[in-house]
Each structure stands twice: as structure tokens, then as C-alpha cells.
Image (tube, rainbow, N blue to C red):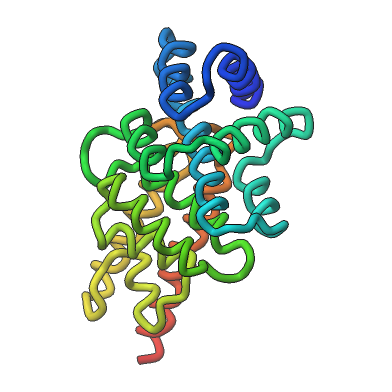
Amino acid sequence: MSIWDRLGEFVTRVSSSTSSGVADVVEAVRTVFSGDADLRRRVAFSVAMIALSAKMAKADGIVTQDEVRAFQEIFEVPPKETRNVARLFDLAQRDVAGFETYAERMAQMCGSGHSNCVMLEDILDGLFHIAKADGLVHEREGHFLHRIAEIFRIDEAHYEAIMARHVNLGAGDPYVVLGIERGKPFEEVRKRYRKLVSDNHPDRLIARGLPQEFIKIATTRVAAINAAYEMIERGLRHA
């Protein structure tokens, strides 16, 4: 059974048995999937991505077709499950609780309790992918994403590395993507690159709770890491 089938069961149960606020959603995830920690992590990740995407769309003030398409790219939602995803998306948009309340609850549900939790970085990465869908990250979206990072306890260096995979930061961009200072010996750059590729292999992300259906996050991240490394390598070769 796919994550979408389980999410469909969850959405139906939440809609019929609670007042459908953020607190109810979080508690329902904990209760419904209490007997399966791995499934609970995967459902929690899915709920967090859908709910915070909805809050980001509301903060921006408009949902464009590009954002909808990007949302579908990240989620690869089967046609039969789009209604359940839309119900959860609408639930989050209608909830009077602000996005910060959602982010705090989702951090408790998905996070490790430590700063720079990798699963929370995965969620932020997915949000960036959706935000940039119409060609740029708008100012309101930028403020939203930075505040989410603060709530998730993702430090500034990690945040800038995530942002650099999606937004052109200028000449220093490839170094920021790899999280390494310009001017470091090439062997250190290569060592850092290999570690990032290993850490972000799709199998690693699935092992820490990323649902198989969200693997596009991993593949787009590795593509950005590869592109940054190749850019640095070409620059050093022609220096």
C-alpha cells in the first residue's frame, strides 16, 4: 500500500472526527499510526509538506498553475488521490492558525529535536522547489521560508546552502551549494562533494523517513550538487 493510500485513510478519518485544526492533525498522525514508527514518520513528512505548502501559498496571496504543477512534481500524486491531497491542502489554508504554529507542530512531529535536522531540511527543500516554480522566489515567500528555517532550527549556513540550490546567489553560488569556503584545496572540495552525494543518496533519504513518492526531492538536490561541483572543477581547471 502506497503512502497515498494511507494518507487517504488518514484524511478521511481527520475530516470526520476532528475540528480539523493543526493540533487535531498532528494528534491524529500520532494516534492513527502509533503502532508503526516508520509509517508515522512518512505520513508526518507528507502532511507537513502539504500543510506548509498550503500556508506558503496563502502567505504569497496567490496560487499559480506553475506552483500547482511543481507541487505535483514533488508529490507525484496518483490521479485517484488528488482529492484527498486537495482536502488536506484546503484544510490547512482554512485553518485560522498561522504558518508559524503549523511549522512548530510539524517540527515536533518530524524533527529529531536537534538543530539542522535532516528531515526538516528535506521539507524546506521541497518548499523551495514549489516557491521557485513561477521563475523566482517572491519576497513574501522568501520571508516565509527564512522564518520556517528559524522555527526548524536550521542555521544560516545550512539555509543558504539550501537556498543556493534554488536561487542564483551570484559568483559564490557553487561554493555555497557545497557548503565550503572559496579557496579551499580542490581535494577538500572533492571530499566535501563526495560526502554530500553519499548523504543525499535517495536510499539514505528514504531510510530517514522520506516517502518513496517524494524521491524527486533527492534527485533534484543531487543534480544541484553535481552541477555546483562541475562548475567549481571547470573554474579551477581553467584558472
Compared with 74, 193 (above or below) is: below
Compared with 184, 205 (above or below) is: above
Compared with 160, 21 (above or below) is: above
Residue furthest to the bottom: 239
**Quick one: 76 or 197, which is closer to the camera?**
76
Residue furthest to the right: 79
Residue furthest to the top: 35
Compared with 148, 77 (above or below) is: above
**Left or right: 56 with respect to 143?**
right
Residue at position x 46%, y 75% from top? 168
Quadrant of the drawing holding the C terminus: bottom left
Quadrant of the drawing holding the N terminus: top right
Q: Is residue 94 visible?
A: yes
Indicate the position of residue 103 as horizontal and vertical percent values. 38, 41
Indicate the position of residue 12 as horizontal and vertical percent values. 64, 17
**Left or right: 203 with respect to 152?**
right
**Left or right: 27 with respect to 50?**
left
Quadrant position of residue 84: top right
Q: Is residue 1 visible?
A: no
Residue at position x 25%, y 61% from top? 156
**Quick one: 223 or 112, which is closer to the camera?**
112
Residue at position x 43%, y 11% from top? 31
**Left or right: 213 with respect to 128?**
right
Residue furthest to the front: 96
